[in-house]
Image (spheres, rainbow, N blue to C red):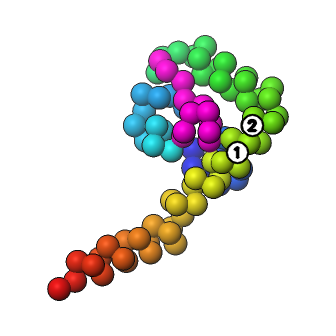
Amino acid sequence: GSEMCIRDRPSVGFAECAGVREMIEDGVTGRLVKGIASVNALSDALTELMQDTTKRVHYGKAAKKAMLDYMPENVFSKWDKILAECQP
């Protein structure tokens, strides 16, 4: 997931997985497939991205941009701000 996104690679995952749903925006940063047991749906999504270079590159760039919010320096600065606001 996030390791691939930060390297300009789109991800493919199952829509029923909560963490995956949070990290992949279907049709923007990768593909979410429905049916956790659907090997065919997963295979189709992977094949789609392997065969469509333009889509794969576009999704990959969007994925990298989306993952910047999850980088430690960005997360830590947000926590620092929240904690500072909680100080009496």
Q: Secondary structure at mark 2?
A: helix
Answer yes or no: is residue 48 visible.
Answer: yes
| Amino acid on which disc 2 is placed | Arg
Q: Residue at x 70, y 53 (%)?
A: 7
Residue occupying the far left of the picture: 88
Mark 2 crowd level (few <14, some 14–19, many ≥20, 10 Å Cα): many
Magenta residues, as a range?
A: 24-35
Q: Residue at x 66, y 18 (%)?
A: 44
Q: Which mark is residue 8?
A: none
Q: Which residue is the site of mark 1?
A: 60
| Amino acid on which disc 1 is placed | Gly
Q: Secondary structure at mark 1?
A: helix
Residue 86 spot, x, y in % from top left? 23, 77
* Left or right of residue 82, residue 76 in this image: right
Name above or below for residue 42 compared with residue 13. above
* Left or right of residue 80, residue 57 in this image: right
Q: Residue at x 65, y 53 (%)?
A: 64
Residue occupying the far bottom of the picture: 88
Q: Report, in whole angstroms, how far the alpha carbon at label 2 lies from the one at label 1.
A: 6 Å
Name above or below for residue 20 compared with residue 72. above
Asked where in the image residue 40 lies, by quadrant, the reply is top right
Asked where in the image residue 6 lies, by quadrant, the reply is bottom right
Q: Which mark is residue 56?
A: 2
Across the whole image, how many numbered discs are drawn on residues?
2
Label 2 close to label 1 by CB (< 8 Å): yes
Name above or below for residue 19 compared with residue 40. below
Answer yes or no: is residue 11 visible.
Answer: no
Q: Residue at x 74, y 42 (%)?
A: 58
In front of the other: 48 or 85 = 85
